[in-house]
Amino acid sequence: MDSLCSTRLLVAILLAIPFVVNPTPGFGQRKTTPAKNQRPEPLRYYMGREIAPPMSYLGADWLIRATREREERCSMVLSNLGLKPNMTVCDMGCGNGFYAISTAKLLGDKGHVLAVDIQPEMLVLLRERMESEGVNNITPILGSVDDPRLPENCVDLFLMVDVYHEFSYPEQMLETIHRALKPDGLIVLVEFRAEDDKVPIKPEHKMSLNQIEKEMTANNFEFVKSFDKLPWQHMVFYGKKRSDLP
C-alpha cells in the first residue's frame, strides 16, 4: 500500500474506530443505524430485478465448504484477478474471509486487503481465521448497508463475489465504491449466471450479463473485460467511465 493511501486509511480508521472490528466481539463497537429521516428505505427491487437478502453469519460455514473449489473454481477466480504485490484490494462482503485470506497471501507483505462486511459476527470469524493462519495484512472494517467506510482514491481492486446482488442501497454503495477506487482501478463482480437454469442457486441470487451492464453503466462504470470460464458464475471487470477521469 502506498504511503498516501496508508495515511488516508489510518485517518479513516482513527475517525471511525468503532467500525474496525477487534478480535473480541462487542469491543469498540456501537450501533451505527442513523435516524430514519437520514436514510431512505432499503430497496426491494432495482432496475427490474429483485434484491436478495444478505446471507446471515449463521450460514458462514457454507462459504468454506469442501466442495466450493470444484463447484466455483475459486482458484481460477484468484489467478485471473491480475493481482500485483503492492496492491490494495477490497474484499467487499468478505464474510468469514474465504477470499480475503487467499488474496492477502497472494499479495504478500507489500500488499493489503480491506475486508468489509456489514455483520460484525462475520468479521469476528475472519479475525479468528487470520490468527489461525498467521495472516496480518488484512484490515477488517465494519461497513454499513450504504457505505463501506473507505478512504478516497485508495483501492486498486474491488472484489465482490456473490455480494453485489444483495446491496439494498446499490446506488449509494456504488457511489462510495467509485469514490474509493483509484483512477485506473477495477471492480470485479462474480455473480451466478441468471441465463443458466442449471446453476443450482435461487433466482434472486443470480444476475445476467445484461442486468450487470445496465446497473454498472447507470452508476458511472464502464465494461473493461470478462473471464468466461467459470462453471457457474460470470466474472466481469469494470472501471470508472473515462469521462469521470481527470
Image: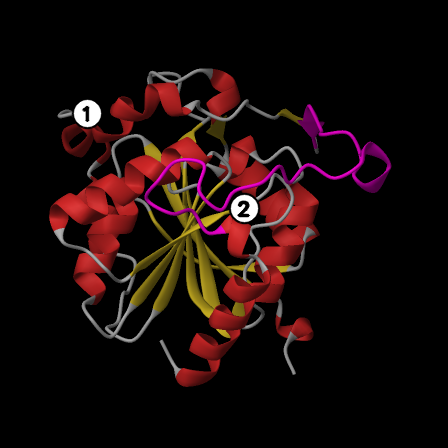
- The residue lying furthest to the right in this view is 37
Where is residue 98, by image quadrant? top left
Image coordinates for residue 202, horizontal then vertical, percent: 44, 15
Specify the amino acid type for callout 2: Gly
**Quadrant location, the N terminus:** bottom left
* Most foreground residue, 224 or 246: 246
The residue at 14%/30% (across/down) is: 70
Residue at position x 39%, y 17% in the image: 197
Decide if residue 229 is in sight here.
Answer: no
Work out whether residue 211 or residue 201 is closer to the camera in this orientation and state it.
201
Residue at the spot x=20%, y=29% of the render? 68
Amino acid at circle 1: Arg
What residue would you read off at disc 1?
Answer: 65
The residue located at (24%, 33%) in the rendering is 72
Magenta region, main secondary structure:
loop
Label 1 Cα neighbours within 10 Å, binned few <14 / some 14-19 / many ≥20? few
